[in-house]
Image (tube, rainbow, N blue to C red):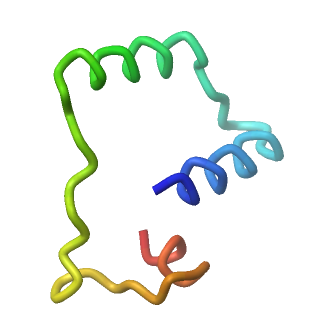
Amino acid sequence: MWEVSTSAKNVAEKSRHVWVDKQSIAHFSQKLLAEGIEVPAWDSPYHFYDGGKETVAYL
């Protein structure tokens, strides 16, 4: 899951038309934590997974 965040960060840092609203991310993260939201299990029969960069590209 963190690979997606890292990839998005790289895109945002190099982009001229995308920005990261750190205050909104902090608020959203706190909301997820307070609500006890967990990362759902990966449903392999329906979603591609190779353990590498191709999975991130799939997302």
Q: Is residue 32 above or below residue 2?
A: above
- Residue at the right extreme? 14
Q: Is residue 2 above or below residue 12?
A: below
Q: Position of residue 51 (x, y in %)?
A: 50, 83
Quadrant in the picture for the C terminus: bottom left
Q: From the viewer's perspective, tell me whether residue 9 is left or right of residue 26.
A: right
| Residue at x 49%, y 16% (from the top left corner) | 26
| Residue at x 49%, y 22% (from the top left corner) | 25
Quadrant in the picture for the N terminus: bottom left
| Residue at x 24%, y 15% (from the top left corner) | 34
Foreground of the two, 10 or 41: 41
Q: From the viewer's perspective, tell me whether residue 9 is left or right of residue 4.
A: right
Q: Position of residue 45 (x, y in %)?
A: 16, 88
Count of marks overlaid on the render: 0
Q: What is the quadrant of residue 16 in the picture?
A: top right
Q: Position of residue 36 (x, y in %)?
A: 19, 27
Q: Position of residue 6 (x, y in %)?
A: 65, 51
| Residue at x 23%, y 41% (from the top left corner) | 38
Q: Is residue 43 above or below residue 29?
A: below
Q: From the viewer's perspective, tell me whether residue 19 is left or right of residue 46.
A: right
Q: What is the quadrant of residue 22 in the picture?
A: top right
